[in-house]
Structures are given as C-alpha cells and as structure tokens.
Image (tube, rainbow, N blue to C red):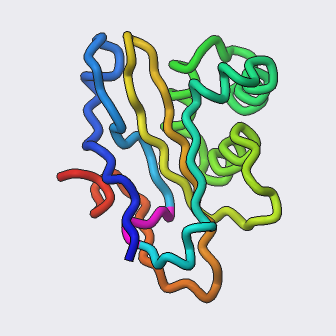
Amino acid sequence: MNQVFQARKYNSGRLFSGFKASYMILRQHKFPWEYPQKEEAYLCRYDSDRVFRQENERAKACAVKYVGKDYRNEYDLVAWIQKARHEKVISFIQEFIEADSAKQWTGYRIMLTMEQGWPILTLEMYAQTKESNTKVYSRRIAPNVEA
C-alpha cells in the first residue's frame, strides 16, 4: 500500500503570528491515508503559490469567483476554505489547479504552510471509484495527520 504525506496537526496560533508552519492540516474531506498502487492516478497535488505565480490573473479570478468580491489575498482564501461547503471546495480546487475534469473528484485535503508570513496552500484531490474500498477521512484527527 502507498501512503500520502502525513500532514501536521493544525495550530491556529501559527496562522497569523509570523511563525513558520509547514504542511499543517487545514481541512480534508474523504481523503485517504493508504491507497493501492493502482489508485495512484486518482490523486493530484498542487501548491497555491505556483498556481498564482504561473497564472496569476486566472488564479485570482478563480479565487474571486469562489471567495467573493472581497477577496484580497491568500489569507481570505484560507478563511473561506475553513467555512465553505465541501462541494464548493472541491469545485474551487478542481478549477484552481485545472484538475482533470474527466475524473469524478470525491475528496480533498488542504494543508497550510506559512512562509515568511505568507500562506501557501497545498491542494490535493482524490477520485475514489465505486470499486475502491480505500478508507477515507474527513476530520483533522485521522491517520493521515500527525497526532
């Protein structure tokens, strides 16, 4: 069995304090810890800073579409992700990272890294097939998150 990267425990104190945090779990929904090799193609992962750097105007337009006209920066995106409905988050990630639209994405995980006081989101998606019996998790306390 393959394993995804184990996220670090969420600590809200590191969010705005200037502390460095890396791969801290922000949110997940129906995302695996272990999965068989044959499901490797059903996972995708991108970092928000790369998307913003490579396609800034498209990325900003996508963020405004989901967060709303009050979107100013990635801090607003972090706040929106924490309260948005799962369906909206999946749609956002799929559009933001331009994930394969032929796949039926069923889950996601978002990890937060603070770099020089700026949030970087690691956006992951998972497409669980009907034939799959891979166990998935939807909380911050799960095997795919450090205790």
Q: Quadrant of the N terminus?
A: bottom left
Left of 95 or right of it: where is 10?
left
> Residue 65 appears in which quarter of the rendering?
top right
Image height of 80 relative to 60, above or below: below
The location of residue 100, given as percent across then percent down, is 76, 56
Q: Position of residue 99 (x, y in %)?
A: 73, 50
Does 24 sit above or below residue 87?
above
Which quadrant holds residue 107?
bottom right
Q: Where is residue 3 in the image (x, y as percent from the top left)?
A: 37, 65
Q: Could you tell me which residue is drawn at 60 percent across and 14 percent down? A: 73
Front residue of 98 and 92: 98
Question: Against 40, is 27 above or below?
Answer: above
Q: Main secondary structure of the magenta part?
A: strand
Residue 14 falls in image quadrant: top left
Instruction: Based on the picture, tell me whether residue 32 belongs to the magenta stretch.
Output: yes
- Tell me what residue is drawn at x 76 percent, y 24 percent: 55
Q: What stretch is highlighted in magenta?
A: 30-34
Number of numbered discs overlaid on the protein picture: 0
Q: In this view, does 47 lie to the left or right of 103?
A: left
> Which residue does the image show at 66% across and 29% down from the upper left?
51
Q: Residue 110 location, x and y as percent? A: 48, 43
Identity of the residue drawn at 73% across and 67% down:
104
